[in-house]
Every structure is written in C-alpha cells, then in structure tokens.
Image (cartoon, helix red, strand yellow):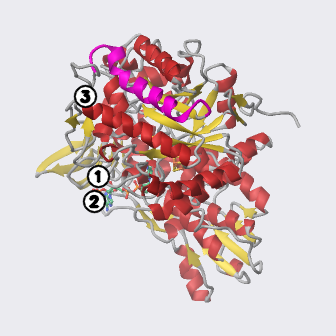
Amino acid sequence: MNNPYPHLLAPLDLGFTTLKNRVLMGSMHTGLEDRARDYPRLAAYFRERAEGGVGLMVTGGMAPTRRGWLAPFSSSMLSRRQLSRHRLVTDAVHGADAKICLQILHAGRYGYHPFVVSASAVKSPISPFRPRALSARGVDREIRGFVRAARLAREAGYDGVEVMGSEGYLINQFTTSHVNQRKDQWGGNAAARYRIAEEIVGRIRDEVGQDFIIIYRLSMLDLLPDGNSLDEITAQAQAMEAAGATLINTGIGWHEARIPTIATMVPRAAFSWVTRAMRGQVNVPLIATNRINTPEVAERVLADGDADMVSMARPLLADPAFVNKAAADQSHRINTCIACNQACLDHTFRNQTASCLVNPRACHETEIEARPAASPKRVAVVGAGPAGLACATEAAARGHHVDLFEIGDDIGGQFNMARRVPGKEEFDETLRYFRHRIAETGVRLVTGTRVSAADLEGYDEVVLATGVHPRRPGIEGIDHPKVLSYVDVLAGGCVVGDAVAIIGAGGIGFDVAEFLAHREGAPKPSLSSALFAAEWGIDRSLGARGGVRGVAAKPEPAARAITLMQRKTGKLGAGLGKTTGWIHRLDLKRRGIEAISGVSYVRIDDEGLHIDIDGEPRLLAVDHVIVCAGQEPNRDLAGELDQSGIGYTLVGGAHEARELDAKHAIRQGTLCALAL
Ligand code: NAP
Ligand code: SF4
C-alpha cells in the first residue's frame, strides 16, 4: 500500500534514538495526574494512545516544586516516593512501542494557591493570588527543582522531559518584560530574561546525559503587546539548542491573552507560520502546534516545510487510533476533534477529570468498555441526533441488530444547526464520522420516517432519542408573524430582516447572533488564517512585539442590528464554556451587538418587541424576534409507547432538555448502548 502521508509517517532520527513518526501527542492536563490512585487510569489512557500509533507523547504538566503547583496538591514530580506510580505509565507506553516525556511545568503566578512565586510581584489577571518575587537564591532553588524532576523522570523510565517555557507559565514570566521587572542577573535585556531557561535546560542536560530527550516549549508568539520580538525569540531558541534541547516545540499565546488560539473558530493550523519563521535559525527539529486535527492538515504543515513534527493533544483524546487509521489510509474513520473544549479544557479548568465530547471513553478507558453483547438483540433507536447516533453505533458495534429511525432527511439533529454557524464548521466532521460508523457497524438507517408505537412492536429494546421541542415562552404576541424560532433561522432558511432581537442568551442565542452577524457569502475568518489574523490583530509579519498589533484588529461589523437578551442579571453567556465563553462575548461586543440582561419581555406587536429594564419601558423596533429560550423534552412518542405497554429508555434531550448539550447526549447514548 502507498504511504498516504509520507511526511507525517516518516521516522525522525534524533541521533541517540528514533521516533517512529512525526506525531507528538502534546501535553494535556487530564486531572488523572493529580492523585496517586488515578495512575492506573492514566496508564490505560496513555497505553491506548501508544497502541494507536503515536510516536512520542508528553504527560500533563508536573510541578517541579510545591511553589510551582497549578493548584494545591496538583500533579508534581518532587521525590522518589512518586516513581512507582509513574512507572505504571512508562511501562504501559513502552509495552506498546512508543515513547513518552514528562512535562515539567512551573505555574509561577498562574498557580491557584497562596504560595505562588514569579519573576516579579505582578499579579496575573487569571489568578486571585499575588505572587512573591523570587530572590536570586529562590531562582536557583526553582532551577534545582526542574533538574531534580528531570532526574526523577529518567529514573521513572521516561524517555525525556518537556520544559514548559510558554503559555505564560513561570519560565515565560521570566522571559518577557510583561512580568519580569528585575534588575538582577535574571532580568533586564532579553538574554538576561531567558537565562533561567538556559540554566534549566543546560543543567538538565548535564544531569541526565546525552541520550535523553529534552523538548523546550518556546513561546514563539506571546500575543501580548509587551511580549518578545522575533529577534529575541530566535536568540532564545538558539540558546536552548546550545544548552542541549533535542526538540523545540511551539507555544502560542499566554493564557491571559485575549486572542483565541485553540478554540473551534480558530482556523486549522492557523499558527504553523509561526514555527516556520524559526526554521533555518536552529538545527534541532521544530514542532508545530495548535488546531492541527486531521492527517491531511498535519501532512500539509510538514510538506510545506513549516515544521519537522506536529503536536496534537485534543485530536488524540478524540481518537486514540488516529495515527494507525491514517497509516491505513482510513482518515475518514477518524473521530475528529471539533475543538469545542467542552469536555477537555473546560473540565480541567473546573477541576474535573478531562474527557472528550465526541469520545466519552477518553480518560475513562478502564470504566467505559465496549464488550461484545452476550446475546444479540433487536434494538430500535428513534432519533439520529448525537445521542441516538452514539447509542445506535455503539450498540451495533457490540453485535446488536440496530434500526435507527430519523424523522428528518438526514442524521445530525441539533448538530445540523450548529454546523451552519460560522466558526462551527468542525461539527461537520462528527457527522462524517457517524455516517461511516453507521456503515461499518451495520446500523440500518431509516430517514424521513415518523415511527409510531405500532412500528416499534417486536423489538427487544427501544431507545428514544427524539430530542427536544424549542421552548415557546408565554409572552404576549408570541404568535406574531415577526416571531421566529432558532430552528426557523438555522435550519429553516427563513429570511431575516436587518434589525433583530434575540430572546435568550444561552449557547443557542449566541450561535444565532453569530450566524446573523455574518454577511451571507462573505469569507469566514474561521476558514482563513490570514483573515483570522487580521480580525484579531495578529501580526503575521512578526514585526510587532508579541505578534500583536492591537489597535489594528479589524473585526467585521455585524451584518445587521442585533440585540441579544436575557432575563437574568449579570453577564450574558455565563453558562458558556469557561475557555470559550469569553471569546463569544468579546467577539459579539467588538462587532457592535447589543447585549442586555435583566429584561422583562412585555409584548410583541407590529412595532417590535416591548421590554422593560429596571422599570424603564423600551421598544426594540425590530423586523424579527428570534426565540432561543431553551427547550423542552420531545416525548411525543413516549406517550404512545406508554399506552401500548412498550418499554423504552430515554436518552439525550428527550430525557433531560435542561442543560442538555452534545457532551451529555453522546455520553448518555454511549452508556445506554453499553448497558443493552
Ligand atoms: P440554555 O443555555 O438553557 O439558554 C436558554 C436561554 O433562554 C437563557 O438565556 C434563558 O435566560 C432564556 N430563557 C429560558 N426560559 C425562558 C423563557 N420562558 N422566556 C424567555 N427566556 C427564557 O439553552 P440553549 O441556548 O437553547 O442551549 C441548549 C444547550 O445547548 C445548552 O446546554 C447549551 O449549553 C448547549 N449549547 C452550547 C453551545 C456552546 O457554545 N457551548 C452552543 C449551543 C448550545 P433567562 O432565563 O435569563 O431569560
Ligand atoms: Fe476536541 Fe472537544 Fe473532544 Fe476536547 S472535548 S478533545 S475539544 S472534541
């Protein structure tokens, strides 16, 4: 068979060792690193990805000292007492013929605890704790912590370490003047600021010898106005090579930068040009990262010469067999990461174990296991939205005979609306994945059919994944012709006027605002790195410090006058994901969309929508009022089944519409299938 991805699947010779391909599974904090008792689960998680063909992996970040914790008692590599748990991980990975590095991450002022330290006592906007500036002796003590962690990593069987020098963590706090205001040998010009990184990498190399991988994660684009210049970053890269780094990985943007770097509206491989700028400046291989989520994109990044390796973290959460499927020329079978962050980073930031919206087994490999069915049953699944799709395909994969009924002409349910929203194009990939999964598991799909209770007689199991009905609030005039539901707009193709009011500011209210703000036919920044950079003020010439031109950001004004509302007081979209809600709020604000909270809806009539804010009446003279006021479970069929005495299981929105999202729906559908 021809090699479908010759660059991606080519081995990489590091001199003392060879990586079997160019895929680095990037560091991702799963939460399983934080407790000793979770290491068997962590080992199973890594083993599955190692068996899936990845060449080199990196663990979640481990603090080298207690001051470097991300949160109290979070993951660390401090003493030999911790080695046995790490050996579970390294043995699992080596048993599957892959390699793994331990990431050493010192949180500095991003730590969420009272012992935080940094280059200077400059508080971060994302932690309430003001850091203590390290003394010169203190700096040396933290460096020794890094060296000790690397020595312990080697003892635990790791193939190397990644030194986290980007994303605004401690080393990055030293390397830029954004935080580093020191006057001693660790501050001042660029060389003095990155001396700490040089010392760390150099002393680790002296400690561990030559046959141990050291990856340095370099902040190549700080995305802060007082970040480093290209010359300073290049000099830092060269210093890291001289100090003994084996590979240089790319870091994009500090966590506090208000520019999206990995969310779904960021185009694929949107930052590989940054890594490319470093090529020829150093001799060690360079790794590109951020929003590389398919073998085709990864191959293009490498073939275009942007980098020597690609880092993918979330895509391997979504599909552990990503590399093997690519190698078998079956990229259509890959369960693609849609960059939603809903089950991975949003969980991490809430101190929950990470998982994956499209793959609920991620980080639950030891609990969610698909065993062949003891005795195959006839199963009917009604509704081919995310819950029904997950349930039908998992059940069929276990050997059950599954009929999947869908009233619409196509599979997808709410995903069919989401995929129409600019910046959510990735949702198409999940539907593509399920189409193939239906075919390969042998699910019999029947579309365009409203099933009745009579049709469901004779099945051993009936699963209702019939989804939701949009809620119709009891506002006077709700039947006025000006009123549309979000389904009319996103799925029905209704023509919408130049002035609109949106009732409800949950995920769907924001989606509808985004959809209506976009000028039909205009190019989408989510599909073009150049447009995306222009929209967010990113300087692709790298002439500006930190890679940002700030005032030069050019968001496209909204295509129509839009007012987005909720009855609650407080900020709109408070229930959106922690790592993405701010992007949606900022984006709509920059594009001139009015956001109002604390409203009472009075009535809708020919004049428009009458509202009341703190006792003040106001008329929104709009062409259309679009209702995005949540949903109610669609249990129409359940009533019929009750009358006929046919048993059934409810999953997804039909089970619980409130707070329902695709993450819960896919997980619930999967678990239901495993219980059949
Ligand atoms: P939702 O998040 O529950 O939001 C419903 C909105 O309608 C709220 O803003 C609520 O605000 C308002 N509302 C509720 N009852 C109302 C009533 N009787 N009259 C007027 N307003 C009312 O529901 P959704 O936006 O439909 O989203 C459904 C699910 O999909 C959610 O779980 C959501 O997280 C998920 N989703 C997520 C995303 C994402 O980007 N992560 C995108 C789309 C959907 P007030 O009660 O304050 O008025
Ligand atoms: Fe990707 Fe979303 Fe899964 Fe995270 S939860 S790995 S972003 S698909």
Residue 407: mark: none
The part of the image, by quadrant, that contains residue 175 is top left
Which residue carries the number 2 mark? Answer: 476
Disc 2 marks which amino acid? Answer: Glu
Q: Residue 425, image x and y in percent?
A: 56, 39
Say which label, 1 or 2, has the lower sequence index.
2
Number of residues whose C-alpha sits closer than 10 Å to that of mark 3, classed few (under 14), some (14–19) or many (20 or more)? few
Say which label, 2 or 3, has the lower sequence index.
3
Magenta stretch: dominant SS?
helix
Label 1: element kind: strand
Q: Residue 407, image x and y in percent?
A: 64, 63
Which residues are drawn in magenta?
Answer: 187-211
Disc 1 marks which amino acid? Answer: Ile
Q: In front: mark 2 or mark 3?
A: 3
Given residues 378 and 408, the one toward you in this image is 378
Which residue carries the number 1 mark? Answer: 604
The part of the image, by quadrant, that contains residue 358 is bottom right
Q: Is residue 416 left or right of residue 146?
A: right
70 is within the stretch colored magenta: no
Do callouts 2 and 3 mark residues in contact (Cβ within 8 Å)? Answer: no
Q: CA distance from mark 1 to mark 2?
A: 6 Å
Given residues 604 and 438, the one toward you in this image is 438
Q: Residue 315, image x and y in percent?
A: 59, 44
Number of residues whose C-alpha sits closer than 10 Å to that of mark 2, classed few (under 14), some (14–19) or many (20 or more)? few
Residue name at image x 26 percent, y 49 percent:
113
Which residue carries the number 3 mark? Answer: 136
Given residues 201 and 410, the one toward you in this image is 201
The answer to whether 560 is drawn above or below residue 493 in the figure is above
Q: Residue 63, image x and y in percent?
A: 39, 45
The answer to whether 65 is drawn above or below residue 73 in the figure is above
204 is within the stretch colored magenta: yes
